Amino acid sequence: MNMKHLFGATALAAIMMAPMAMAQETTVIGVSIPAATHGWTGGMNFHAQEAIDRLEATYPELDFVLATASDPAKQVADIEDMMATRDIDALVVLPFESEPLTPPVKRVAEAGKWVTVIDRGLSEPGIEDLYVAGDNPGFGTTSGEFFVEMMPDGGNIVVLRGIPTTIDNERVEGFQAAIEGSGIEILGMEHGNWNRDDAFAVMQDFLSKYPEIDAVWASDDDMAIGVLAAIKEAGRMEEMWVLGGAGMKEMIKRVADGDEYVKANVTYPPSMSGTAIEITALNFVSNAPVSGKFVIGSVLVTQENAEKFYFPDSPF
């Protein structure tokens, strides 16, 4: 059992044991997250709904309002509607993008509501009461260290970034620091927006520009799938390998099988949405201190340990 599941189980147990004397009027917790536009967010939506169902069944005095958004404008509108029509006591939010979501989330906090931010972070520090995320600098560092290990003589690589967010910046900074002085040259770096179709188009552009590419840091498994499709279509599979990330079961299976083009993976669990919701609930049903930062570490997955990270029944 890894740390996030252990913490989630502990939080739920604490909720179940919370004394009835603490019962109060219904507490409304708003949950605003991106829609399931790709694999990772699909898993994140699954775990969020699962946590809500468990908590509502266990503690009826908690009421949840879940809204998903396919763009920042819709997410801003969802949050404003939660405040206006449901008078939420807390907001759990995974920002679609950092910049446009910072002002509306700040207004929620200024209204005296509890704010939990997941994953992508806000552009202004100190707004949230609780921040739950993977280790994004560590994600980049672990990825970069693997490139250095695999390319001891240096080489040429291209990089695909995610959606413009604080976590994307942290990942790229960690990666660049890890490969500094290694002789690895980044030929090009573009946003693939954690989307396989966007990544396919970006990689097509890279392939047309650069005749010699030794490896690709796709930095996300959905983007890695798009990248691999573009490389295959161009007939250049024998020239390079690809590192994604986040632990998609399809990619973990390829690592486990010794795929020469997908040599490793780096974990970034979508179940952190459920963890964030459970910790937020704990704030209202117990005296446990839960404010601060909860960071879930990133682990390098290789053929030797891939079996530990392969969950065939997972939605992601």
Image (cartoon, rainbow, N blue to C red):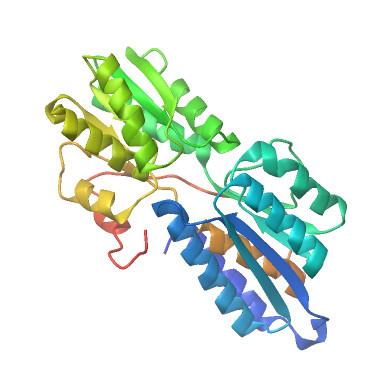
The image quarter in which residue 311 lies:
bottom left
Instruction: Give the vertical position of 272 relative to 119 (above or below).
Output: below
Q: Position of residue 113 (x, y in %)?
A: 82, 59
Q: How many marks?
A: 0
* 2 with respect to 16 (left or right): left
Residue 169 at what x, y percent from top left? 55, 30
User: Could you tell whether 303 is left or right of 45 in the image?
Assistant: left
Question: In front: 237, or 275?
Answer: 237
Q: Is residue 165 visible?
A: yes
The front one of 106 and 71 is: 71
Q: Quadrant of the C terminus?
A: bottom left
Residue 129's place in the image compared with 8, above or below, is: above
Q: Is residue 127 something one can see in this rendering?
A: no
* Apparent side of residue 85 relative to residue 68 in the rendered image (left or right): right
What residue is drawn where x is 34% and y is 31%? 201
Report the quarter where the N terminus lies.
Answer: bottom left
Q: Position of residue 254 (x, y in %)?
A: 20, 48
For image coordinates 21% across by 31% down, the residue present is 231
Image point 79% across, 46% down: which residue?
A: 106
